[in-house]
Image (cartoon, rainbow, N blue to C red):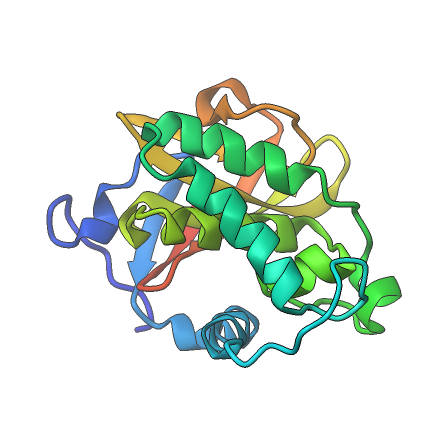
Amino acid sequence: GAFLTVSYGAYAASTHIPIFNSSETTSPRINLFPKWGGALERYFGERKLQGGTCEASFFNRCHLREWSEFLAGLKGQDAISQVHEVNRYMNRVRYITDPRNYGIPDYWATPKQFLTRNGDCEDYAIAKYLSLRSLGFQPSQLRIVVLQDLNLKIAHAILVVDLNGQALVLDNQIASVVNARTIHHYKAIYSINEKFWWLHRS
């Protein structure tokens, strides 16, 4: 089948700290998630940028420089400080739904699109994921988690970072970084990074 039930230690992928009281089944078939793959392809392909001002509505070298300078300022800081600063920086961006922003129900944007056009929950998570990757975090430490918010009864997406034995939640709905153990109204559906994806069951 599509899923691989893995024992601890079989993959780096399987050593994640369990989140939201779920059990996880691992699969390497991330090609099943073309929106995520498309966002990664666009991210790694966005190298030939035009000039322009930081007030422009298209992502240009000025926006890239701002983001790059922010990340450069975090180099050498301890990992937990980098996590908090990336969360704070990205949470300043304005929330906007995909239908209003892109005219389609669901679109996974690159950080460059997000920082230019704003975005919704998974766009915050992607921007935080790729910011931390550029700071040296490994894919095995990071997962974008798609979940059900049981209070609001809507789908939502966050970033979870495994650090120092804790599963840390970076969430555009929560101002500060919190331990996943402190959140009881989220039900994980699936999570994903560059290498694997996980099906979560309660």
In the foreground, 106 or 41: 41
In percent of width and height, residue 170 lies at 54, 35
Is any part of residue 199 visible from this angle? yes
Above or below, 6 relative to 92: below
In the foreground, 189 or 202: 189
The residue depicted at 33 percent of the width and 35 percent of the height is 162
User: Residue 54 occupies which quadrant of the picture?
Assistant: bottom right
Q: Is residue 87 left or right of residue 197?
A: right
In the foreground, 190 or 38: 38
Residue furthest out toward the left: 9
In percent of width and height, residue 119 lies at 73, 55
Residue furthest out toward the top: 182
Q: Is residue 114 left or right of residue 56?
A: left
In percent of width and height, residue 198 lies at 38, 55
Q: Quadrant of the N terminus?
A: bottom left
Is any part of residue 170 visible from this angle? no
The residue depicted at 36 percent of the width and 39 percent of the height is 75
Above or below, 160 relative to 44: above
Residue furthest out toward the right: 100
Q: Is residue 137 left or right of residue 87?
A: left
The residue depicted at 61 percent of the width and 38 percent of the height is 89
The residue depicted at 67 percent of the width and 49 percent of the height is 121
In percent of width and height, residue 84 lies at 50, 28
**Count of numbered badges drawn on the protein:** 0
Q: Is residue 169 left or right of residue 1?
A: right
User: Residue 101 occupies which quadrant of the picture?
Assistant: bottom right
In the foreground, 4 or 72: 72
